[in-house]
């Protein structure tokens, strides 16, 4: 490695929007972020899944059940 061209590596303090703080090696001394593993829905188990079946039924009611399905052409 060349000397004098690399950033200084320090213990950086990471602060989340929920108030959680942790330290990690970084080139920045302070890091602010919106979500962390303590408050992110994926890690807390509060993740919600979309209602796919409801969307399909809604489009079937609006456009008909066979909308977008091409019929097979028969050779005469």
Image: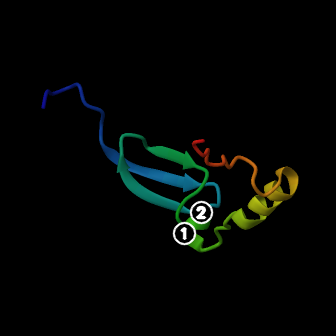
Residue 6 pos. (x, y %): 25, 30
- For residue 72, say whether it is visible: yes
Residue 30 pos. (x, y %): 49, 45
Residue placed most toward the observer, 68 or 17 = 68
Find the distance from the CA under tag 2 to the CA under tag 1: 6 Å
Which residue is depicted at the point 23% across and 25% down? 5
Residue placed most toward the observer, 11 or 36 = 36
Residue 58 pos. (x, y %): 83, 58
Decide: is 24 above or below 43: above
Farthest-out residue, bottom: 45
Farthest-out residue, right: 62
Q: Quadrant of the N terminus?
A: top left
Residue for badge 1: 43
Residue for badge 2: 40
Which residue is depicted at the point 66% across and 66% down? 49
In the rendered view, does 70 fall on the left or right side of 20?
right
In the rendered view, does 65 fall on the left or right side of 76?
right
Are the two marked residues, 2 and 1, in contact with CB atoms closer than 8 angstroms?
A: yes
Q: Secondary structure at mark 2?
A: loop
Which residue is depicted at the point 78% across and 58% down? 65
Q: Secondary structure at mark 1?
A: helix
Residue placed most toward the observer, 51 or 64 = 64
Which residue is depicted at the point 79% across and 63% down? 57
Decide: is 26 above or below 1: below
In the rendered view, does 45 fall on the left or right side of 63?
left
Q: How is the image coloured?
A: rainbow
């Amino acid at each position: 490695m060349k000397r004098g061209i690399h950033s200084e590596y320090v213990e950086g303090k990471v602060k989340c929007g929920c108030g959680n703080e942790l330290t990690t090696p970084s080139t920045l001394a302070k890091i602010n972020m919106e979500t962390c593993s303590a408050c992110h829905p994926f890690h807390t188990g509060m993740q919600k899944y979309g209602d796919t079946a409801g969307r399909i039924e809604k489009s079937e009611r609006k456009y008909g059940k066979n909308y977008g399905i091409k019929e097979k052409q028969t050779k005469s």
